Image: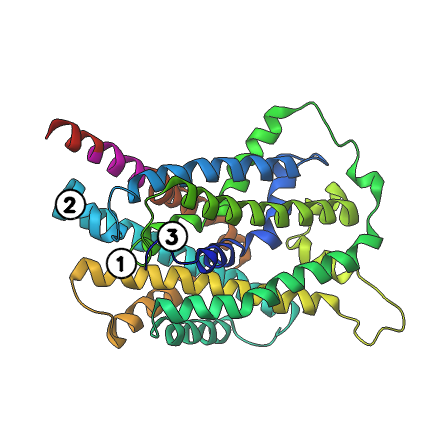
Amino acid sequence: MNEKQPSLPIIIFLISTIIGVGIVTLPRQTALIVGQPNMWVSVIFGSIVAFLNACLIFMLIKRFPKQTLFDFAPKVVGKWIGKLFSLIFVMYAISISAFIIRTMSEIVNYYLLDRTPNSVVLAVLVLSCMYLVSSGLSNILMFFQLYFPIIISMFIILTILSIKSIEVTHLRPIFVNDGLELLKGTNTTFFSFVGYELIMVLSGYQTFTKWRCMTKIIGISLGSVCAIYVLFFILNIGILSIGELKVITFPTIEMAKTIEYQGFFFERFELLFLFGWIVTIFTTLTAYYYSALLGVCKIINCKRNICLNTLVGTAIFSLALVPSGITELFSSATYLNNLSYAALIGIPFILLVISFAKEKFQ
């Protein structure tokens, strides 16, 4: 595939990957740090930082057309260091996969299947993902395109139903002169946009060499997710207030529970949100699962097979079971953020600098 082919599948892939756990947990995390009605500005700041980092990644991958991170890293820094960088990225993909599905299982247990063990929920999701990933990237992209309208429709319906419950006083004052707090919140909101870094994996599927094409893909992807996050931030603040956001673990779901329409045949609107949200979790898991599996195959120089697929699935499943509860799960996010800095910023920056230096001194 080359750049003349449609970029829509890539945009849908990135949006479907980025939207995940953040939409249900981010309002609380940001409220604890910022604590202002205009904390949605931190989301915009986070998207800008993510866009700049995505441009850095593009500067790297455009130098190695039709190659993934796992292909060009050994060429830039040598075989063994390159494999180490690839391994770090694989560890990152496995860790973030484990985190998101464990969060999902906690929510499913709390709101839907309170008597179902976490391990069962996790196993169903991982096995389903194993099956989809085994079919290859083309089928993954087709699956994402199939379910993308369902995800967007869920967001639109929930927004329309929630508007009448907004208390305008909760949104005031809009412009609070405390930019430092908003900047502190950026460190949290930035991680809600992770997923764009998988362009370093998609670069083996589609060639990216033109700034116009890449800025369009990244701009639309991050811009769309940013708009959705800002919208849901405003809904959360307007309906629940900043004070409640600080103490509610999953505010977006609680917001959906406040929707009431007397005489309407459907009463539990949070189920509508959970259905669409679980699909987004599955798409996010699939994207990172595929990246981890591809990375393992590249590191050991073999083709994808059922054994490696099972190995990656088992690693994700086992790591997801490590936290003893939701408190320990959220505490582990700190370690995941540190690993994310390495995978998102550290590795691409080092490879870019060294590749420029090699070109200059050759």
Amino acid type at mark 2: Lys
- Look at discs 1 and 2 and give the one toward the viewer: 2
Q: Is residue 127 visible?
A: yes
Q: Position of residue 108 (x, y in %)?
A: 59, 68
Decide: is 335 above or below 261. above
Residue at 12%, 27% (x, y): give it: 361
Q: Is residue 247 visible?
A: no
Amino acid type at mark 3: Leu
Q: CA distance from mark 1 to mark 2?
A: 15 Å
Decide: is 228 above or below 40. below
**What stretch of residues is rendered in magenta?**
346-355
**Among the 4 quarters of the image, the one containing residue 168:** top right
Q: Residue 157 got which mark?
A: none
* Helix, strand or loop status at disc 2: helix
30 left or right of 322? Answer: right
Amino acid type at mark 1: Gly
Decide: is 295 above or below 174. below
Q: Is residue 351 magenta?
A: yes
Report how many numbered discs are placed on residues in the image.
3
* Residue at the disc numbered 2: 75
Residue at 17%, 41% (x, y): give it: 76
110 left or right of 102? Answer: right
Q: Which is more toward the observer, 332 or 184?
A: 184
Is the residue marked by circle 1 packed among few (<14), some (14-19), or many (20+) residues within 10 Å? many
Q: Is residue 22 magenta?
A: no
Q: Going from the N terminus, do you reach mark 1 or mark 2 first? A: 2
111 left or right of 324? Answer: right
Q: CA distance from mark 1 to mark 3?
A: 12 Å
Q: Position of residue 256 (x, y in %)?
A: 73, 60
* Helix, strand or loop status at disc 1: helix
* Residue at the disc numbered 3: 198
Q: Quadrant of the C terminus?
A: top left
